[in-house]
Amino acid sequence: MKIGAITIGQAPRTDVTADIMRLFDGKVELLQRGGLDGLTKEEIARFAPEEGDYVLVSRLTDGSSVTFAERHILPRLQECIHELEDEGVRLIMFFCTGDFPDSLTSKVPLVYPCNILNRVAPLLTRKSSIITITPSPLQVEQCEKKWSQFVDHVKAVPASPYGDWETLEKAARQVKDMDGDLVILDCIGFTQEMKNMFARETGKLVVLPRTLLARVISELTDVE
């Protein structure tokens, strides 16, 4: 089956596919596009968030990360959707856990990790109390505001999957003593290795969006 994937950063997201393609068991042809494809770092710098903006963090093809306002890339994301439709994909999944407006339209299903997380995570926490790991301090408030719609208690801790390992381990040690029975690594950039570390260091249940997304999509692709 031919399916599409859109990253808000630059494609291809080889860091994401390294963890998820095995779940498709060779039955998927994946076509990727990115909202920042073809742009230089100087051009991307003009997309810096201002007060009141919805903040996004993503990865460039050189491995570095960038922070920008969602509003700047929405038209570019729509272009990505049209390109993948023209390539004949059956559905399009987003490599981002952020919220996106209904103004993005497609002739095929658009699968957003946030919509899956929003529905599944409350079922996995006995105390309706979660801890989210979000890439940037600029995202803490918007992350807690979003998740408070779905659970009774939420605390966001900033730690980027695109930063150094020591910072992630420090965040895990902080989370260990926090009151919450479920940890959500709230960015598609978090890896299976990072999930393993957070589970080991915190002793808590941990949800990894990239593999959750792939497992849901694989339900549609595992036909003989």
Image (cartoon, rainbow, N blue to C red):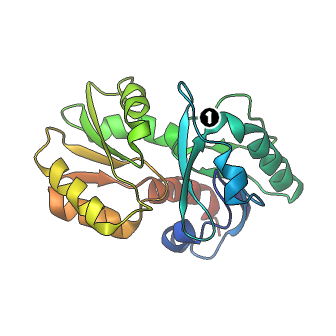
Q: Name the residue at 28% across, 32% down.
A: 154
Which quadrant: the C terminus? bottom right
Q: In this view, does 163 lie to the left or right of 219?
A: left
Question: In this view of the protein, which residue sits in the foreground, 115 or 133?
Answer: 133
Q: Can residue 7 be seen in this view?
A: yes
* Residue 82 in picture, x, y percent from top left: 85, 47
Q: Name the residue at 68% across, 64% down.
A: 11
Q: Is residue 92 visible?
A: no
- Which type of secondary structure does the marked residue at label 1 adopt? loop
Q: In which quarter of the image is residue 101?
A: top right
* Residue 41 in picture, x, y percent from top left: 67, 58
On the image, numbered disc 1 is attached to which residue?
100
Which quadrant: the N terminus? bottom right
The relative height of residue 26 versus residue 122 in the rendered view (above or below) is below
* Residue 123 in picture, x, y percent from top left: 32, 37
Q: What residue type is labelled 1?
A: Phe
Question: In this view of the protein, which residue sits in the foreground, 167 or 199?
Answer: 167
